Amino acid sequence: MRPVSDLVSLLGLPTGAEELFEQALTHSSLSDKPHYERLEFLGDAVLKLVVAEWIFQRYPGLPEGELTKILTRVVSDATLGAVARELDLGSFLRLGRAEAKSGGARKVGTLAASLEAVLAAIYLTHGRETVAAVIQRLWERELAAAAAAPGAENFKARLQEETQERFGTLPIYRVVGGEGPLHQYIFFVEVEVEGQILGHGRGASKKQAEQAAASEALTALKRTS
């Protein structure tokens, strides 16, 4: 379990006022300590407000329906879980013994809830401008992907939702090789779900290869449902 100050520094914030961050990283399985559920409530509202204002200003030509699709995807538990994984948030979580043994630090719902609580802690400790800047930095890639094709088929998003619902975890993608000259390079990617390689993909970019791998993994999961 890593110290809270490490996460605060990772977020680019000054250290020293970390009481709320400690609470934001504490699961309810530690019943003798303040946990993240109240902060999660506030953080959910802060995230939606910041992202809604962000996309409203950034994409003035998009109609309400497209803005709603982008917002829904960007603030989903699947996206929150992906952002939390990039931060290695699970290594900071304070969990009861049983919850830790059951893999609580890897559960998408837990990661998403704690990340929302962390956003609330930033908002309450450092203010709206600071939390907006953190959200825009952490969610920039997810926003760009959602805005590029808000209504398009997204096998990675579907696979995240499926693995979250079934296992409470996220798929893991790895680049396992490639071939061709630099201007025509082809990436090879595999995706792991619950310790098993369920899909392989290839593409002219890592994103394309990951989408292909996710599609294959979805097919494999359907066979076991």
Image (tube, rainbow, N blue to C red):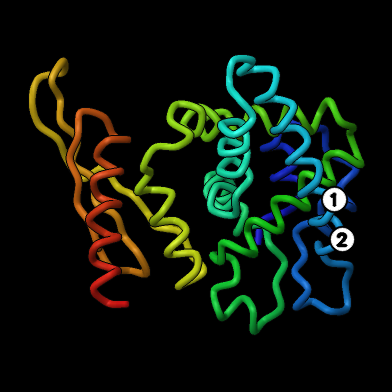
**Tag 1: residue type?**
Leu
Image height of 202 relative to 56, above or below = below
Q: Quadrant of residue 71?
A: top right
Q: Is residue 190 left or right of residue 138?
A: left
**Tag 2: residue type?**
Arg
Q: Is residue 12 left or right of residue 173?
A: right
* Label 1 environment density (alpha carbons within 10 Å; few <14, some 14–19, many ≥20): some
Q: Residue furthest left?
A: 180
- Residue plotted at (78% across, 53% down): 117
Q: CA distance from mark 2 to mark 1?
A: 7 Å
Which quadrant holds the C terminus? Answer: bottom left
Residue at image mark 1: 42
Per the rendering, the mark at residue 38 is 2
Q: Is residue 174 left or right of residue 17?
A: left
Q: Nearer the viewer, residue 133 or 163?
A: 163
Q: Quadrant of residue 153?
A: top left
Image height of 100 relative to 151, above or below = below
Image height of 47 relative to 12, above or below = below
Image height of 130 relative to 157, above or below = above
- Residue plotted at (83% across, 40% down): 122
